[in-house]
Structure formats: C-alpha cells, structure tokens
Image: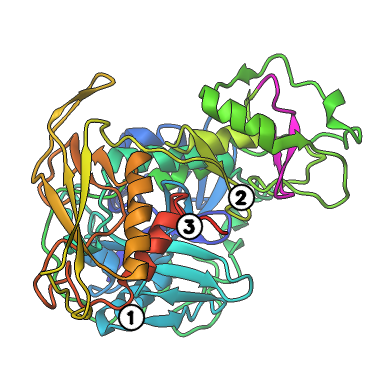
Amino acid sequence: MYVVWEWQGEHSFLPYSAECSAALERSLTTGVNELRLGTVDACLEPFKVVISAMVQVTEYNGVQRPIRRSTVDSGHPFVLGVRWEWQLLYDTWLPYGIRENQELESQHIRGTRSFNLSSLPRYKIDLSNMIQINTGTKFKRNVRRVACSPYRCQVGLIPTAPPAQQATINPAQQPTNNYAQQATNNYMQYATIAPARKPAANHAQQPTANPPQQATANNTQQPAINPAQQPTANNAQQPTIKPDPGAPYRAAQSGANQMGTPKRSKPGPSHTSQIKPDPDRKVGSLPGALVAILAQACTPWRSAQGDSCSVCREEMVEEAGYDTYLPGIIPPRLSLACKHHLHNQCLQAMLSASTDSSSFRCPECQKRYGTQTGNQPISGRMAVKLDSSIRLAGYEQYGTVVVTYSFNSGTENGVSFTASNFPRTAYFPDTNKGNEVVDLMKVAFERRLVFTIGTSVTTGQQNTIVWNDIHHKTSLDRGNPYGYPDPGYLDRVVAELKSKGVELQST
C-alpha cells in the first residue's frame, strides 16, 4: 500500500504532491511533530503541518485546515503518475480526490464514453468531450488527465527522499500549454479567492471535519482519519505509463488558505457608494482595456437580503477578506450585468488569476465580458483555400478546405520564441458546418487565440509556438487520431472556440 496525505479544501479533501506526502510520512514515522512545507516546496513557505493535531497552519495568520493520511494500492493512478483535474476559472485547475481519480482512470481505460461519479452522482463525466456536467444545473466544466510525480511512499517504510521520477501520458490527451510554473502560479492565485474557515479550538479533533460527499471505496461514509486508522481504495491494476520530466504542478494546493479567513463586519448601508475602502489596503491595477470593460459591466451593489459574492460566497454585507482593491470607477461592492455580485477585492483576486488582459467571465454563469485575446505572435499568417481533389473520410462527397498556418521564430515584447514544424496544415470538410468552423478559426486567429507561446509537451522545448487547446485535424490518413472520420469533431471544436469567446453571431 502507498501513502497519500491530503488537506481539506473548500468542499473535499485534496491530495498533497508526492514530494509533500513523502515528507509528511517521513515526519510521522520518525517522530517529527512539525513540518514546514516550504522545506519541500518553496511555493509552500507560509505553511506548516502539526502532525499530532492533524492540521495545516498558515503561519502568518494562524488559519488552520484539517489534514488526513490515506492509503492506495499499487494500481492507483497517483502511484502510476496520473492525475485527473477539473477547470475552475481560466487557467486554474483543481484535482479530483483519491476515489474520483481512481474511478475516472478506470472508466477511461475501459473506454467508457460517459458516466456519473459514484461518490458525486450529480456530476456526469463525458470522456468523449472531456467535460463534467452538473445534472441539476446543466453547467459544464472541462476536465483533463495530466501527469504528476508518482507516489512511491509505502506504508511501514521510512522514505529516504522525495520521489524524483515523473510520468507522462499520450500527448493527444495532454493539455497543449500545460507547463508547470504557469499552472503552479495560477493555482496560488486561486488561493486568494478561496478563503479558509478557522476550525474549532480543540484542534486535536479537527480531522473529523469531513465533507459529506467524500466516501470510501465501498460507498460508505468515510470516518475521521488519524495516523493509526487508514482508508484504502479498491483499485484495479492500471497500465504502465512511461516516465517524462514534465509534471503539471507541484503541491500548490496547500495555498488555498493563503489569504486567511475573511474579516467580518457589521451590515453596511443599503447603497455601497457610501462605503469607503480601507486607506491602509493596497491598491490594485488592471490593464486599461479591462478597466473600460468593467466600467460598462459593473454597477454599485444595492442591498438585497441573501445576496452573496460569486467568488468568496460570503454575504455581500460582509467585508471581503483581501488586502488589494481596485480603485476609481469600480465600486467597493458591485453587481455585473448578469445580476451576479462581487466584492471589489474578490474581483481583483479573480482577475489576477487570469492571463487574459482584455476580457473576463462571471464566475457564476460564465458570461463573458469583453473580447478575449491571446499572446499568439502577430507575425503569423493564415491561408485558406478550397481543394476539390481532397476527400476526407466521412465526407467523400465534399471537397476540402485547406488551412495553412505560417510562423517564423522571432521576438515580441522582449520575449524570444521559436517556431518549430511550420507551416502547419489543417483540413475541414467543405460543408456548411465545416465552413462555419473555418470562419470561426479566422476570428480566433485574428484574436491571437489559435496558438500560444509555451512549452511543447512532445519535445519539452520552452518559449515555442504551440497549439492553444483548439484542436485541428492535421492528417489525411483514414483512422489517424488527428484525421477523419470523426463525426463529433466539428461540434467539439465549436465548443472549444466558444470557450474562448469565439462564436457565431445570432441573426
């Protein structure tokens, strides 16, 4: 059996990294009561773990979260170096728990197209389109399967060093711009918009704070975890995964309580234009384009009982718990045009987690404000032509629209980049839907969204031009994963474009 240490997030327990799990297990087995996580990962400098109380403590503000120690067998995805995640905001991805990871991996290996999570039955997973669907609200989120450092710490053995080997998966299943440092930074930014709650004074009993949806492998409610009583997961044997140097992110999960507990205040006046920001707070800043968009999208919040912030989930009459606010035209408490509400400081934290400088989405309903643009080099070219001699599998009665992208290596905004394997050619059927997709691709290219500058998951090369999560069919070979036939491809790529704000205009 292998050990996985976890910390309690807002709704469930989430895994520490393999390195942190090994360090925690080493501390437990050698009698060390406290471990400063910054000694394992510099990103986790503010946090320490008190093993006797089974809590994680944020040292500069005292905020605590329960932790627990679980075990999995050798077939679990974590041991094999695989992790499943769901998308929260923009580039922010959260890991599923131990049991959900096992179920997702097992269904993936079996080739299941869709299923409901047994521990969270309200969520349906569509593996064909890699989305999670809330069966009640019908809201959809992206999911992905990524590499992580394999968990090698075995029960009863004292780890001598954190695991160094990492793993990879099929490049076709790996996010195309999933480079570790950006993902880590994004998660730490998310830490500022997920404030923790302080536990009761009796810290020794804290591990009993268990989320109701978390369950053991036999579908019974999971008891409190202590070092002497461990849950196990009923795991099927998984195939071997080849080693690779790229891991999606380290143990940044523990940063989810970085900003601490929101400060409480008495209910404020009914019109928030009278509320003055604390002069001691730091003043945030945003690109001019976003400031203009916010000026049009935001109005001062007016008191309504039960209104809550769509980021921190505190009532709007309560004070936000963050130190950075947006001055000027942005009111201290605001409402968006979609009728959802935000604290000024929570808005700043949310926008800080995004790399998009020209648009943002409501965190509640995902309505986009502004026009999203990317960092695709401006020197690129997109050429489109019709070739009636090419017949795509599944569209033999139609011609083919051939799209060619061309880029050269260069430097923009002080950043040097390379352009490998260009020109690149993609193929679309000359049908009404195929031509609609090509028109959308033109818009996406003009907005610099088709490519991005990042790290290649196939070569590991950094600062190179890579695909930006808008899939293209680049092969004419029948049955090739990057070719045709693929009946659902056009619908999927329309959804991918829509997620970036590129969609057909209604008439």
As shown in the figure, which amino acid type bears the numbered disc 1? Answer: Gln
* Quadrant of the rendering where the C terminus is positioned: bottom right
Labelled disc at residue 469: none
Earlier residue among tags 3 and 1: 1
Q: Which residue is mark 1?
A: 107
- Left of 437 or right of it: where is 268? right
Secondary structure under the numbered disc 1 in the rendered image: helix
- Give the foreground label among 3 and 1: 3
Distance (Cα) linking label 2 and label 3: 55 Å
The image quarter in which residue 185 lies: top left
Name the spot of residue 65 as percent of width and height, x first: 55, 49
Extreme-right residue of the structure: 270
Q: Is residue 11 above or below residue 32?
A: below
- Give the foreground label among 1 and 2: 1
What scheme was used to colour the molecule? Answer: rainbow
**Which span of residues is magenta-colored?**
327-344
Distance (Cα) linking label 1 and label 2: 38 Å
Q: Which residue is mark 2?
A: 203
Residue 58 visible in the snapshot: no
Name the spot of residue 346 as percent of width and height, x first: 63, 37
- Give the foreground label among 2 and 3: 3
Q: Is residue 234 above or below residue 406?
A: below
Name the spot of residue 476 as percent of width and height, x first: 11, 69
Labelled disc at residue 504: 3
Nearest to the observer: residue 75 or residue 363: 363
Earlier residue among tags 1 and 2: 1
Earlier residue among tags 2 and 3: 2
Secondary structure under the numbered disc 2 in the rendered image: helix
The image quarter in which residue 234 lies: bottom left
As shown in the figure, which amino acid type bears the numbered disc 3? Answer: Leu
Secondary structure under the numbered disc 3 in the rendered image: loop
